[in-house]
Image (tube, grey):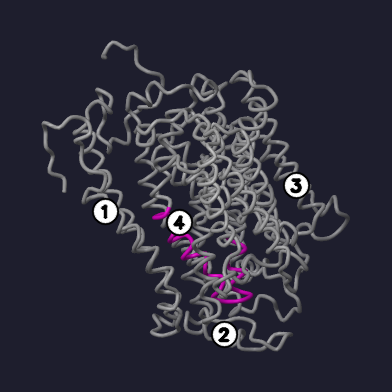
Amino acid sequence: MKHVDWTAMTVFLLFFVLVTVMGFLASRWRRADDAAHLHEWGLGGRSFGTWITWFLLGGDLYTAYTFVAVPAAIYAGGAAGFFAVPYTIIAYPLVFLFLPRLWSVSRVHGYVTPADFVRGRYGSRGLSVAVALTGILATMPYIALQLVGIQAVLDVLGVGGSGNWFVQDLPLFIAFGVLAAYTYSSGLRAPALIAFVKDALIYIVIAVAVIYIPMRLGGYGHIFDAAQHKFATPGPNGKPSGSLVVGPTGQWAYATLAFGSALALFMYPHSVTGVLASKSRNTVRRNMAIMPAYSLMLGLLALLGFMAIAAGVSKGAKGYNSQLAVPQLFADMFPSWFTGVAFAAIGIGALVPAAIMSIAAANLFTRNVYKEFLKPDATPAEETKVAKIASLLVKVGALVFVLVMDKQAAINMQLLGGLWILQTAVALVAGLFTRWFHRWALLAGWAVGMAYGTWRAWGIASPATKHFGGSSAEIPGIGETGYIGLTAFVLNLAVAAVLTLVLRALKAPEGADETSRADYSAEAGDEAVERAPQPAAAH
Amino acid sequence: MPSPSPQVPASGAPPVASAARVLAGLCLLVPIVVMMWVPSYSKVTPKLGGMPFFYWYQLLWVLLSALFTGTAYLLIRRDEAARRAAAPSAAAPSAPAADAPAAPVVPAPKDGGQA
């Protein structure tokens, strides 16, 4: 398979050059005069309106890895992989309840990260740094997985995969070097601008794919029949390899995975960054109503997994890497030039979230570790400088991760990352509504949730890996199989509630709350927002 | 029940659980409940254009959830505008209507001439 498709390659490279130029020019786009402030580099000046936010969040949440992994899961196992669709259906109504409050309080107090809010709300450095480190830890493997997405595309294009390790990974180095350079110079404006190209490409490719490919394969009826046939054939363990619907034993896992992932989605630092960059509370709300356009696209894209089965992309190879199923499907079905467009969509789809994630992780490090513990009197200009350098280090870390550890480790770590980040939800979401929980109880709940979740996930083996081989296990007390992250979250909540009662009885110090009730409903244009401190002066 | 009693001061603003808020909450709850009820849709038939029920039903709910969330947004926006009107002290003198997306409201405060 190692011949290079030059037409596809040329189209792919043209788009890559285009977004690179855009990435560097982005620093001049909507430029403000206080460029030294972290909220300029790290939040695009908090100025994005409805449409930019929509493209930015879409580019941010629906990543290249999603495009590769969701259909890959469907290709390998059928219905269970489709949980990504109810997950994104549930996510927006769920976060509609609390994200506007997070936007308001962050705007009034100049918070740049979720950990900033926790610090201000609970007056607890310990809880704040726990939230910050969890965020960084969960984001790193996520960035690494974007590289896996690019690798899948390059592999099918016929680049890399052979020769020594340096030649093999050279395209990846170049892609990431360029990404790092324009993120450094332009900050959040770069991915915001590139997201337009990425999302336009993705929508075109999916629209063409879900019409054109079934026409070539004999219609959806035939596609699902082929899938049914494949799943009914027993695998090596004698059981059917998949199913077209979720069986009775898989339904709890399906629902809890969808719900837990939906709650976790906006705990990720990069999602919060996208939300805080918007210019008003109603911009956030409006986006919750229009984001499902991306979910529809994701659902259609998931069906490509079935099309890959019907098209026989594995060509009978044993142990076929299902991550390659969709890129291979494009290469087999589309004319070369359009394959190039489709691959550009996936490739750029990796760059946008990787940029936002590294910015979010850099913001966390700068605000909640560097300024909090290392240099409390850092000036705004110093903060921005540190964040820029941190964004480079985060990317290098992700690159090393993919090169040194195997791909499976990145996937395992990302599963764990989702489970971990969900454990910050109690402090964050509850904190937006009530100060009832005690800060130490929240910290204890977080620790218990992290430990329990990691321990349960450690014990799961899969054909591909001995530990961390999945994200579902039996829920104690219920007996059904469910998402470990959600079980850990419930445990976390219970520990926090019980300890809060105990600590209150003991009259443990509550910590200062610098927010007031009205802050949570402030809207752009309000006096409180007009007088809001610059982020650097927040505390 | 938004029956404003004008003589009551600040705390007399619309109740915490106004009809609009409750309705918006229900709008947000519906898609979540429908999707969590997996047994109701985990079946192959009726098919639509060859696609099993399981798949087209969930894709359909992507669209319906957008409608429900959009309705919740409109309800909340009206409710918030009513609250702001009822409690003028909380809003800026120039408080733009919640639906003025293009207004450049964020940058530095104007030169204070219009207090």
Q: Nearer the viewer, residue A474 or A49?
A: A474
Task: Indicate the position of residue A92 as horizontal and vertical percent values.
Answer: 42, 54
Question: Does label 3 lie on the same chain as label 2?
Answer: yes
Q: CA distance from mark 3 to mark 1?
A: 48 Å
Q: Nearer the viewer, residue A13 or B17?
A: B17
Quarter where residue B106 is shown: top left
Q: Earlier in the sequence, mark 4 or mark 3?
A: 4
Quarter where residue A293 is shown: bottom left
Badge 4, how many Cα within 10 Å: few under 14, some, many 20+? Answer: many
- The tag on residue A408 is none
Task: Give the number of the mark in front: 3 or 1.
Answer: 1
Amino acid type indicated by mark 4: Ala
Amino acid type indicated by mark 2: Ala
Q: Nearer the viewer, residue A477 or A10?
A: A477
The residue tagged 2 is: A226
Element assignment for label 2: helix
